[in-house]
Amino acid sequence: MLALDAKGNLIAGTDGSGLVYRISPSGEAFVLYSAPKKEITALALDDKGNIYASGVGEKKTASSSGVTPAPQATITTPIPTVTTAPNAPGVTITQAAPPPIPLVNFPAPGTGATGGSEIYKIAPDGSPTRLWSSREDIVYALGFDPQGGLLAGTGNRGHIYAIRSDDDFTDLLKAGASQITAFAKAPGGGLYASTSNLGKIFVLGPGPQSEGTYESDVFDAKIFSRWGRAEYRGAGNVDLYVRSGNVDNPDRNWSPWRKVDLGGSSESWAPAARFAQWKAVLHAGTPAPRVQSVTLNYLSKNVAPVIDEITVQPNTRFSPLPRSANPDVALGPGQVRFDPPPPAQHDRDSVGVKWTAHDDNDDQMVYTLYYRGEGESRWLLLKDNLLDKFYSFDASLLPDGAYTYKVVASDAPSHSPGEALTAEKESARFEIDTTAPRIENLSASIDNGKVHVAFRAVDGFSPIRRAEYSIDAGDWQYVEPVGQITDSKTEDYDFRANIPVPTASIGSASVAASATDHVIVVRVWDRFDNMSSAKTILRGK
């Protein structure tokens, strides 16, 4: 990006490092400013020797910008701002009136933005100041109006901003193209503006017009909505119009523009639809017309909640989450509600159930949890009035068996009685078994110098999983059932094992192991890790 100052010096902006150079006619270069952004996209010099530069993109390494931040604005008119309120949704869309009618002030840009672009002013003494920043717009061109005011052409919304001072700028107009790419003086004091996507050339006249029109951006309510009263703040002779439609392009079969009676009820009379837009037509007069804010109230059609998924987690106990200080505050545009995962602890005596759910109206929801045994037809209440999306309980409260859980979600906390909607979802089949298997008919005897052990393991619900034995407090040893495959609720075990032969020295004699008592212990597990054990004593002769 290049420009010439009054002394014939070349002013150059770079990409990658965001530097603004002054290069003398002899070729000597001097860095005037290192911008916080990595690319200088436009340059302009006024007749007082001030240099204006726009920057975009983030540098890979942070560095001190040496910029004096612009002070806080005293007039706060957002551009555009959308807010919604719980239970009685409303959208506030506020934008500036178009020139050449007297301009509307906007908030100061603050100290910069992480995305978008910024405009810097380098005074004749070399001191830099940040004038303006935007998270949404990228500056492609800088120029001056006939009165010497700074203009910024941006994309990708095709806006031209009039920057009056460090804390005062105006959304001048929106062109019918994506990017404003250059400015040039036009005969008679006007100004040419070239655009891309689509390529066009516009002429901005030097004097005020008798009438100006401004159209707001299209607002997406996300859901089919009823549009209510329009709230307007401004001055002078202004006509306000609204329209609505169900596609994001207002040129595709939207409703016609309908005038709002600003002196009466201010009913918008926009047909129920998902999208809406307003238009202000300003007429010259005294006082000068100004549009400070326009609010379109709306009520989205209530839609039922959606339960996305239910998960049953055995051996899990959930801890309650801390309650939000204000859980009913509605989210702003583009914000997504985040539900942190519940703290979970391993607890083999508990069963945890959690689910995910959402509501397109962003309503607050309350949940009810039911259970039903396999083969049963009636749902039984487990817990109601749940605000969290999880619940854990003592598994022993339910008899051993197979169950299905059902979650019912309701948006009742956000609606009048009779207006609430519900949704429900069932979990996959789940089994509970908290009862240990039984060990029956345990016997032990000596057979040819070995211990012969037999017993039966029985479980009332789930198959036996494993069995082990120990003799005389020795290591546990795995043992297979008679059929070798452990897959039944009843398993028979019959095996022989070597007897540990400790000897007690009495002179040169020893006491045989067969004359010693032996303790045989067996234990078994079912598939839910419930364990039981039993022992028998084999008396020596």
Image: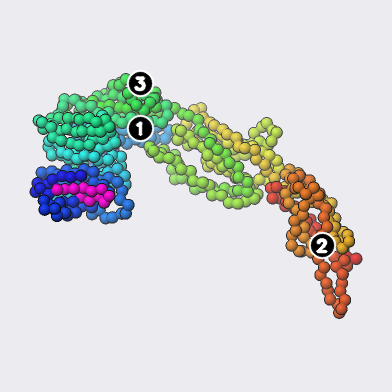
**In this picture, residue 52 sits left or right of residue 240:** left
Does 14 lie within the magenta span? yes
Whether residue 126 is visible, yes or no, is no
Q: Which amino acid does label 1 sit on?
A: Val
| Residue depicted at x 72% and y 49% | 465
**Residue position marked by numbered label 1 in the rendering:** 91
Residues tagged 3 and 2 counted as in contact (Cβ below 8 A)? no
Label 3 vs label 1, nearer the camera: 3
Q: What stretch is highlighted in magenta?
A: 10-20
What is the x, y in percent for residue 388? 53, 42
Label disc, if present, on residue 253 of the rendered structure: 3
On-image quarter of the N terminus: top left
* Above-or-below relation of 309 to 247: below
Dot 3 lies on which element? loop
| Residue depicted at x 69% and y 36% | 374
Dot 2 lies on which element? strand
Q: In which quarter of the image is residue 372?
A: top right
**Residue position marked by numbered label 2 in the rendering:** 498
Badge 3: few (under 14), some or many (20 or more) residues near its Cα, within 10 Å? few
What is the x, y in percent for residue 70? 23, 47
Dot 1 lies on which element? strand
